[in-house]
Image: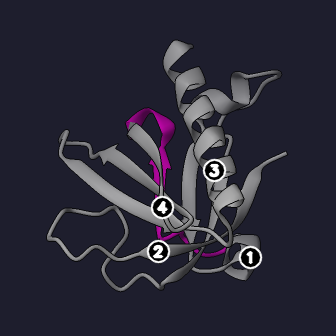
Amino acid sequence: ARLQGPAGRRRRTSTAATVLPQNAPDRLHVELVPRRQGFGLEPWLGAELVLWESEKVAASGSVVPLCSISLTKIAQVQHRPENCVRLRIYSENKEARHESLTFASDSEAKSWCEALTESVELVRQA
């Protein structure tokens, strides 16, 4: 089963670099997607966090996502106040970027934070 669902984008007031394009919508569809074949943990070792404009766009399979982030590039996952999960991500040139996603409830944000943290740790240990 894949981890997926709606999320919001918290726009930053600072000039810190983000992974989503500036014109990305405030409401998104987020999925944790396996990228390898195999059994057990194998498919998840190449997993990516994929951000789409909507669930409908994601399901169409014909549109490129807004962004796709390899779990190996996620340096930190933090649960923040106001139903928020903050990600620190390293780009190809090792530049730190940040993205904050908001969820419908604090418990949903905590669940996403825990699942992403566990997934990132599993990939690092493999």
Give, as a single range, the part of the protein colored magenta. 62-73
Amino acid, disc 4: Pro
Residue count near mark 4 (Cα–Cα under 10 Å), binned few <14, some 14–19, many ≥20: few
Q: SS at mark 1? A: helix
Q: Is residue 96 magenta?
A: no
* Pointer 2 or 3: first along the chain: 2
Q: To which quarter of the image does residue 95 belong?
A: top left
Q: Position of residue 89 (x, y in %)?
A: 34, 46
Point 57% across, 13% down: residue: 126
Separation of residues labelled 2 and 4 (CA atoms): 14 Å
Q: Is residue 126 above or below residue 69?
A: above
Residue count near mark 3 (Cα–Cα under 10 Å), binned few <14, some 14–19, many ≥20: some
Residue count near mark 1 (Cα–Cα under 10 Å), binned few <14, some 14–19, many ≥20: few
* Pointer 4 or 3: first along the chain: 4
Separation of residues labelled 2 and 3 (CA atoms): 16 Å
Residue assigned mark 2: 9
Separation of residues labelled 4 and 1 (CA atoms): 33 Å
Point 67% across, 32% down: residue: 44
Amino acid, disc 2: Arg
* Pointer 4 or 1: first along the chain: 1
Residue assigned mark 4: 81
Quarter in which the N terminus is drawn: top right
Residue assigned mark 3: 110
For the residues bearing labels 2 and 1, Cβ distance under 8 angstroms: no
Q: Is residue 120 above or below residue 22?
A: above
Mark 4 against mark 3, which lies toward the viewer?
4
Mark 2 against mark 1, which lies toward the viewer?
2
Q: Position of residue 124 (x, y in %)?
A: 49, 20
Mark 1 against mark 3, which lies toward the viewer?
3
Q: SS at mark 4? A: loop
